[in-house]
Amino acid sequence: MKERAREVLGLKPRRNARREPYIVILTITPAMALAVLEGVNRINRKLRQWKVDTIARDLCAGRWRYNGAAIRFDTQGRLLDGQHRLWACVEANRPITTAVAFNLARQAGINIDTAMPRNGADGLNMTGKYGVVNNFSMATLRAMVTGFGKPPKLSRDEEGELFTGHQAAVSFADEVMGSSARVSGITTGSTRAVLARAFYTCDQAKLREFARVLITSQATNNGDAVVVRLRDWLIANMRSGGTMGRRERYGKTERALKAYLAGENIRHIYACTTEQFPLPEEVNA
């Protein structure tokens, strides 16, 4: 049984097989991946299809890289770790080159993925390609891309490409809303996202003034009243969670900004339900 994993991968049985763990580097084809999944994937966690899809997209786009992380099997030849990578290999119909670890104790499974994971900003910073990226920037980027929709499940490479395309807009929103400060209910991903989107088509001086009033509530003219009303509503409703709460904050911020830019002193801020500040790629789609 312990050599079953080698068999499904097309490897010859070892002479004088040892009991201790060992690692080999293999290029796993879709057929090999499917053989593992159908033959020895018996004790794994529930599959997350979205994760399979993100890896498969990276494989198809040539973005997947060997990083030393292993496909892991226990002493009985059962798959402990790697089912999402293997299913992505099958789905994308692309081979993957990876380390493969054999003869791990079954109890080792409890320690898999328990080290401190890198978040999106950590991952982009380690590449050295995107400058200094912080968590505020990632929150702005994700909320900007989401808009009124459902947050997309993106790979780190896909986030990196989006960050490269929208870095100027994200940096602008983070600058005017405070890149290292937090005002509860105000400097959220939703409000930053609206300013990042508006960066492409609106007067940046007016966007800066909108952000200043929103953060401080210090109005200087009658046109600032709508911004103060938005600020009061955001603070009063900052604990409104879930998708509906996020969309309402985003929609009201868009409506208030639209009114502010047009010089409308609206007394009631109703949330927009359609995008007021489309991204360049949305306009050209």
Image: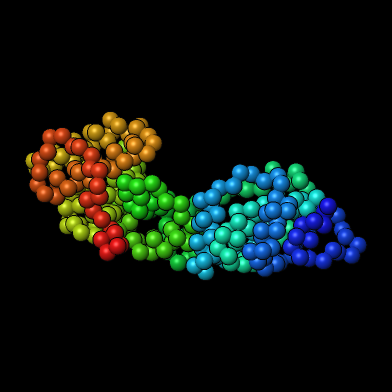
**Image quarter hosting the C terminus:** bottom left
Q: Does residue 161 appear left or right of residue 201 in this picture?
A: right
Q: Residue furthest top?
A: 236
Q: Is residue 253 visible?
A: no
* Front residue of this view, candidates 71 and 40: 40
Q: Position of residue 257 (x, y in %)?
A: 19, 46
What residue lies at 82% left-to-right and 53% top-to-bottom? 2
Q: Quadrant of residue 9?
A: bottom right
What residue lies at 86% left-to-right and 64% top-to-bottom? 14
> Is residue 230 depicted above or below 44 in this figure?
above
Q: Position of residue 268 (x, y in %)?
A: 15, 34
Q: Does residue 250 appear left or right of residue 56 in this picture?
A: left
* Front residue of this view, candidates 42 and 170: 42
Q: Residue furthest right?
A: 16
Q: Position of residue 99 (x, y in %)?
A: 69, 63
* Front residue of this view, candidates 146 and 7: 7
Q: Position of residue 61 (x, y in %)?
A: 49, 67
Q: Does residue 234 appear left or right of residue 75 in this picture?
A: left
Q: Is residue 110 visible?
A: yes
What residue lies at 66% left-to-right and 60% top-to-bottom? 33
> Is residue 271 depicted above or below 105 in this figure?
above
Q: How is the image coloured?
A: rainbow
- Please give the count of numbered marks on the rendered protein: 0
* Front residue of this view, candidates 263 and 8: 8
What residue lies at 25% left-to-right and 61% top-to-bottom? 283
